Image (tube, rainbow, N blue to C red):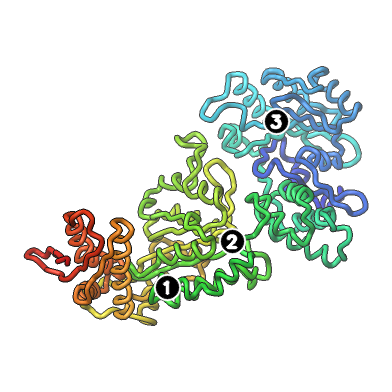
Amino acid sequence: MSPRGLDDHPAWLREIDASLTVAPAYVLHGNLRDRYLVPGEGGRWTPLDLHPALWDTLRRSGFAAVLRHTPVGLQVLPNEPEATRLVARVTGLNGELNGRPIGPDQLTGVLRAVTSCRDARLALTIDYVSQWRPAGIPPTDAEHAFMQAALAVVHDARPIVVGSQRTSGLFNPLIWLVDRPADLPPWLTGGSEGIRQISVPQPELGARLRLARGLVASMPGGDRLPEEDLENAAARFAERSVGMSLHAMIATTQLALDQSLGPERIDDAVRAYRIGMTENPWAHPELRARIRNGEAVLSAKVKGQRRAVRHALDILIRSNTGMTGAERGGDATGPRGILFFAGPTGVGKTELAKRITHLVFGDENAYVRFDMSEFAADHSEARLIGSPPGYEGHGEGGELTNAVRQRPFCVVLFDEVEKAHPRILDKFLQILSDGRLTDGSGDTVHFGEAIIVFTSNLGVPELRPGEAVPVGAELETAVKKAIEHEFSVTIHRPELLGRIGDNIVVFDYIDPVTAVELAGEFIGNVVRRAAEQHRLELTVSAEVRRDVVELAVADLSKGGRGIGRVVESTLVNPLARALFDLPAGTTAVTVKELVREEGGWFTVKLV
């Protein structure tokens, strides 16, 4: 147990406290602009900003003050006359302590005064170091000189013994606050063992739960809830806030107050903070009604794939009933659903993703598709998430992150995912595990309301025309085995396969009965298009229909896409030529005969 009562403080503060005997300088990076829970009077937890939390730690070791330097001026903690007078005496500063900024030359003198002081324990923090100069611009001569002085201090500083709190000698430390350690020159951060780098992490579940207990009680109606209900709401808040800072949790509660959302609607409050919407379209009664008829609706458009349709509906039903991730015992943090559609080309994989979108949202604009063959190069990652700072296009965002930010309730399709560069596949790990992705600007985009669909042709045997096609369990086993080998052995991403889990759905080849049905449907589409474009009553004779269907279903190796191509070449092309020469004013016509000419060309005879 810590003699200074720091056992319940964040780990990074305990590390600073424990290393003051050996570290004259620190580089803090990571989650610096958050709140940090420290225990207060009566067992209450108080969320403090970084500098108040740092002061709360250092004062327990006998520190008299912390001097904070920022681009807008100097600040003394604690904000008390005695501390200000002490800092003014040690540094020779007076008016500058009232918020006026000082330059690097004057700051060098302050650094030497603070670190060499022998009669008081002081600390100096240098904040917003990463923003000193624009990206790619080297430091000025004065800034470089200050950093040299800082390195010299690390080598020359000596610990002091002051007061009775700690009898060991402690350094008066210099503390850099940076976005990344690389924002400081490597000769500075790597030049001495006396500079200790400490990462300030995102809050863990325990910290989020402690804060949530106090926050839910302050939400509308929270003071009237039984203790058990408050504890359950706090636990749910802590689980739903994975990836959020404590500052964001406090802001979520403020939003809940503004929207009059009580603890029982904590999910809506978190959703509103993350994506700006309190409504949950997944729970709408209208969606439940559409899902009830979903199998018939989807099967009418995606024929012969009952297994895939039922698996997709299971995901929609889980989302509508709030059962997504129930088996994990906590709240789901990934997307609403994950589907991996595998199987032959032209059998309805992409079409089913579109139809799911229309079923759920009533709007196919909520469907976003990415052809992953376009992302085979390492640098194409920037297209998805945006360029990092200092690179062309920074600030414009990525195609994926922009699309989901603008429409968080959506279906995102990654077509032929095996063709993507492995570095891009790594991005999917974050999406599938945490339901979020950091874009090139450092902003977080949330995928928790999206359905993620992958498609792949892995493991599908190449068939010659007329060759018998594998079906059912035989095809499913071959395809799943190929997928497992690809991710585990070829690209060394078994963890991605683990995130997809049991959501690999293998589509069957189009069977002959379904093929005939599809060919008939395509012919019907041709008739409807003639009516829409030409106000023409078009009839296809039984003989022509039979001939076209027979030709279309002769080779099923290319699936529905291949059937459509045959209908196009045997009927649509010759019909279009005939309509082109049709006398004006014609209102009805029948395709009487289909003629195969030399060279494989087709013509039609109209009456």
What residue does disc 2 label?
A: 334
Q: Secondary structure at mark 2?
A: loop
- Cα gap from disc 3 to disc 1, whole angstroms: 65 Å
The picture places residue 210, in percent across and down from the top left corner, at 80, 56
Amino acid type, residue under disc 2 in the picture: Gly
- Which residue is found at the position 32% from the left and 65% from the top? 525
Amino acid type, callout 3? Ile
Q: Quadrant of the C terminus?
A: bottom left
Q: Is residue 408 left or right of residue 229?
A: left
**Can you name the residue that lies furthest to the bottom here?**
473
Camera-side residue of 433 and 268 = 268
Residue that mark 3 sits on: 126
Q: State which mark lies toward you, 3 or 1.
A: 1
Question: Residue 91's quadrant in the figure?
Answer: top right
- Residue at mark 3 to residue at mark 2: CA–CA distance: 38 Å
**Closest to the observer: 135 or 520?**
520
Q: Give the percent coordinates (x, y) of residue 554.
A: 21, 75
Q: Disc 3 vs disc 2: Cβ atoms closer than 8 Å?
A: no
Residue projecting furthest to the left: 598
Residue lying at 72% horizontally and 39% vertically, measured from the top left: 23
- Mark 1 lies on residue: 300
